[in-house]
Image (spheres, rainbow, N blue to C red):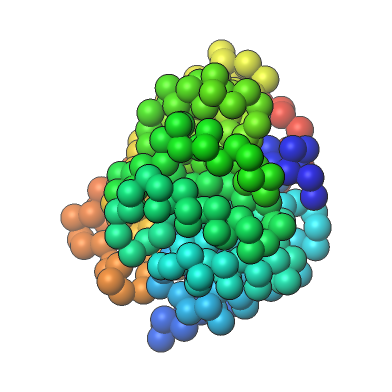
């Protein structure tokens, strides 16, 4: 798939489902994938932060990718997160993901320590040279302490396989800064749920979303309304969604997203250590947020989504 035409809309960062013994549950994860596709999302990100990439072995990651590619069967793009500790490991992962048939790689900085800018650029460049799979650069300085600035992105513009960037810094000015520096060279994605309206209004054509795992139809509807400048219809949905979207900005976003998935019947809340279950107070907080959200769930305007299952 050509990223310029297919990397648009909402790409949930899919959760990885685990059995009671914390082994990967491929069948349960497949059900999550099938439900998201049926709800009309535009793409999927497997093995991202929300998919607990760094808690999985290579064999587990590749089995998840094979399942997703087979299940989706070309209906929409499947992108794999890449969060390796060294450039060599990242290159090996990129080659294997390419063999499996993913449509793209969402590459994080080297996860071993906060790198210098030239080290981060070298890491991205090394992985990009190892594969012809299209790459989305993932910037999340609050979580990973390595900041990929607009100036650094501009320095990567000559590498053809780097086609997109996902910004989770929360600073929406960067979308404009990158565009001013590089024109339309990179496909811009929002990576932080609670700034999606601002990000899409400023030019992001895609949204890698955490909480759209829980409310995928609402996420895709909101995105399309903003994209089409239907702000009068978008704002009430954004206001309703915001307490849920804020959960994506927490350090325990994976536990929060999976707990909300469990509450709505879309998965379990099991996470691998060191991510531990939410405590009683945290669960009570999310119970209240979800109870209010479900009680006030808005009617969605027509945006071209398939009929609800």
Rendering coords of residue 298 (x, y %): 53, 31
Residue at 48% x, 53% y is 122
Please say if 103 is above or below 149: below
Residue at 46% x, 83% y is 23
Please say if 110 is above or below 297: below
Residue at 67% x, 61% y is 131
Q: Is residue 98 left or right of residue 170?
A: right
Total numbered badges shown on the rendered structure: 0
The foreground one among 59 and 136 is 136
Residue at 64% x, 45% y is 159
The foreground one among 85 and 271 is 85
Rendering coords of residue 29 (x, y %): 58, 69
Q: Is residue 141 left or right of residue 12?
A: left
Is residue 269 something one can see in this rendering? yes
The residue sitting at the left extreme is: 281
Q: Quadrant of residue 100?
A: bottom right
The residue sitting at the bottom extreme is: 21
């Amino acid at each position: 798939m050509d990223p310029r035409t297919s990397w648009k809309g909402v790409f949930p960062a899919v959760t990885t489902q685990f059995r009671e013994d914390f082994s990967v549950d491929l069948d349960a994860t497949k059900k999550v994938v099938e439900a998201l596709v049926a709800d009309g999302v535009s793409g999927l990100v497997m093995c991202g932060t929300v998919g607990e990439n760094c808690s999985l072995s290579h064999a587990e990651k590749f089995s998840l990718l094979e399942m997703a590619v087979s299940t989706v069967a070309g209906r929409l793009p499947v992108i794999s997160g890449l969060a390796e500790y060294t450039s060599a490991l990242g290159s090996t992962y990129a080659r294997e993901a390419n063999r499996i048939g993913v449509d793209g790689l969402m590459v994080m900085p080297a996860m071993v320590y906060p790198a210098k800018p030239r080290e981060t650029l070298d890491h991205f460049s090394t992985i990009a040279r190892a594969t012809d799979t299209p790459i989305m650069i993932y910037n999340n300085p609050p979580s990973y302490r390595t900041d990929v600035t607009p100036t650094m992105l501009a320095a990567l513009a000559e590498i053809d396989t780097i086609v997109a960037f996902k910004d989770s810094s929360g600073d929406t000015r960067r979308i404009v800064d990158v565009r001013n520096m590089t024109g339309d060279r990179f496909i811009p994605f929002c990576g932080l749920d609670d700034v999606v309206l601002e990000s899409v209004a400023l030019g992001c054509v895609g949204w890698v979303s955490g909480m759209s795992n829980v409310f995928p139809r609402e996420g895709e509807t909101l995105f399309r309304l903003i994209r089409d400048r239907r702000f009068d219809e978008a704002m009430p949905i954004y206001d309703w969604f915001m307490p849920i979207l804020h959960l994506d900005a927490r350090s325990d976003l994976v536990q929060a997203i999976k707990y909300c998935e469990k509450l709505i019947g879309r998965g379990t809340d099991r996470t691998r250590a060191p991510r531990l279950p939410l405590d009683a107070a945290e669960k009570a907080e999310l119970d209240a947020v979800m109870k209010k959200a479900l009680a006030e769930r808005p009617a969605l305007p027509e945006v071209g989504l398939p009929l609800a299952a």
